[in-house]
Every structure is written in C-alpha cells, then in structure tokens.
Image: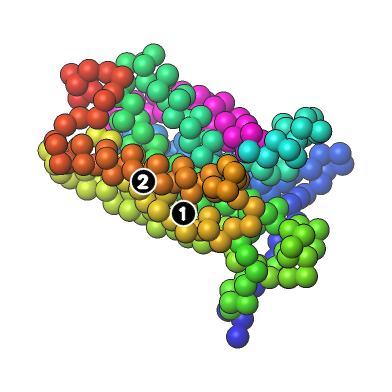
C-alpha cells in the first residue's frame, strides 16, 4: 500500500520569455522574508531593537548564501574545476546549510562587535527563524530532484527522474524523500525553540542567554546525522561524510555550551561585557 508518493513537477515555476522563476530561488526568498519578520517579532519580545535585526538580516544574506555555495563547491571542486562559470549558478541548486551557518555566524560576530550587542542574544533571536528557513528551503531539493536518499520500497517514497539518478541506481525509480524527513525534523526543532523562547520570557531569572543557540546545535545536528546517512550525494572528506562530522562537532559544542550555562552557571564568552549584555 502506497501512503505517499512524491514527484517533482520540475525546478521551474514559471517562464516569462527569457526569464525563469525557479522554485529553489522562490523558496529561499520566502524563507528569508519569513525569517526577518519572525526574528523582528522575537527581538521585540526580548526588548531588542527590531531595526537591529533588519540590519543584521542584510549581513546574513550577504554572508550565508555565498558561504553555503562556496562550502558546497569546495567539496565538489572536481565537478566545477572545468566549469568555473557555474560556481555562481546557485539557482540550479547546490548549497550546503553548514556553509550558510558558518558564514552567518561570522557575519553575526562582526555585526555584534560593531554594534556592541551580545552575539548570543542575537543568536537566540535568529535561531528559530534559521531552523524554520531550513524547513522551507529543503523543499527546494524536492523541486530540483536532488539530495534524496537511497532506493526504498517503503509506502512513502520519492520518484526521481532517470537523468537525476546516480549511475549505480540507474534502474531504481523510488528513493527515500530525505528532503521531507529533514523538513519535518526541522519543524519539530522550531517548535522546541519557540517553546523555550517563551519559557525564557516567563522565567527570566532561570533562562541563560545562548540557550536557544546551543539547543539548536544539538537538536538540528542530531537529526542531520541520521538523515545524512540515508543520502546518496553526501559531501565527502576522504571516506568521511562532511555533514555528519560537522553535526557531531555541533552536538559537542551545543552540549558543552549548555553545561557551561546551567552546570557552571556562567555566561558564554561574548563580544560585549556582561553589563552591556544585560541591557
């Protein structure tokens, strides 16, 4: 019995003469817009100037999207060495969220330093929007028929066109819809972060700044490890799946941060002093 069978209608939403509007780009733009509005709302609840988030969002876009692309290209260089003009073709897919996170974290760190605001305060405010954006963005993989899992005969499955199948699975038609697994997982992480955010508002003496960022690292990375194990197109470093390696590091850093905050009851290292941090 088939419970759900997914098949992409194609990567292009509409064509207007020489202009093509792709699902991937539309989803990224939608995720950014929703993320900005959500982060501004959360900032207001934390008594942080929402305009500061609007300014930060520009930094994040300028850093995260190129970071995601360059990270992907770096681990797929053999595919781009002879076609360097395709490095900027982000609309065709091929970005890595870990590159976006790294680029965004660096941008936020610099932004925090320049504006004398807590990095961890901003990270807490942005984390729910980030994971929600990831949930939305994963559907871009669906429309591009990419980032899917191994072949499966489960009642839920994803049809992949022959042109998009790995050579070793050329005779297979249905694969694990890993885009869906991760999207659902990310929505669950989003709900956890939102709950913790408002719990922190109700219990300000018990909540430590940086909690949401640390929980994000642990929760997202935990899901990414097992989902990545199903995929057929993982970025590799030798025989190691890069996403799993980064996810393990994310879990370690996230747990260490939570132990530091609630075990030792100390603030995380920040770009501003504790006095400024509490304002």
What residue is drawn where x is 26% and y is 25%?
269
Look at 31% across and 30% down and name the residue there: 120
Disc number for residue 37: none
Residue 40 picture quarter: top left
| Residue 81 as seen in the image, left or right of residue 242 | right
Q: Do the CB atoms of the residues marked 2 and 1 lie less than 8 Å apart?
A: yes
| Foreground of the two, 49 or 119 | 119
- In space, the residues marked 2 and 1 are separated at their CA atoms by 10 Å
Mark 2 highlights which residue? 251
Residue 60: % across, % down: 50, 29
For residue 52: magenta? yes
Magenta part of the protein: which range? 46-74
Q: Position of residue 259 (x, y in %)?
A: 21, 41
Residue wearing tag 1: 225
Horizontally, residue 277 falls left or right of residue 217, namely left
Depicted 64 relative to depicted 174: above or below: above
| Residue 211 appears in the picture as rendered | no
Image quadrant where one finds the C terminus = top left
Residue 97 can be seen, yes or no: yes
The residue tagged with tag 2: helix, strand or loop?
Answer: helix
């Amino acid at each position: 019995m088939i419970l759900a069978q997914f098949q992409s209608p194609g990567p292009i939403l509409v064509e207007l003469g020489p202009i093509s509007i792709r699902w991937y780009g539309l989803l990224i733009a939608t995720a950014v817009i929703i993320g900005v509005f959500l982060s501004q709302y959360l900032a207001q609840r934390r008594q942080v100037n929402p305009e500061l988030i609007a300014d930060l969002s520009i930094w994040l876009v300028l850093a995260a999207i190129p970071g995601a692309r360059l990270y992907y290209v770096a681990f797929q260089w053999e595919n781009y060495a002879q076609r360097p003009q395709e490095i900027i073709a982000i609309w065709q897919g091929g970005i890595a969220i870990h590159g976006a996170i790294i680029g965004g974290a660096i941008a936020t760190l610099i932004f925090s330093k320049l504006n004398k605001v807590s990095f961890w305060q901003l990270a807490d405010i942005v984390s729910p929007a980030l994971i929600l954006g990831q949930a939305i963005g994963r559907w871009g993989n669906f429309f591009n028929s990419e980032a899917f899992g191994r072949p499966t005969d489960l009642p839920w499955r994803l049809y992949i066109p022959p042109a998009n199948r790995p050579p070793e699975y050329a005779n297979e038609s249905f694969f694990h819809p890993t885009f869906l697994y991760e999207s659902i997982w990310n929505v669950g992480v989003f709900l956890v972060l939102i709950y913790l955010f408002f719990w922190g508002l109700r219990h300000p003496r018990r909540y430590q700044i940086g909690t949401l960022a640390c929980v994000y690292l642990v929760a997202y990375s935990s899901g990414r490890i097992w989902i990545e194990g199903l995929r057929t197109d993982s970025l590799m470093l030798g025989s190691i799946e890069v996403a799993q390696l980064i996810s393990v590091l994310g879990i370690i850093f996230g747990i260490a941060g939570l132990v530091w905050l609630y075990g030792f009851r100390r603030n995380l290292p920040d770009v501003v002093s504790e006095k400024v941090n509490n304002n």
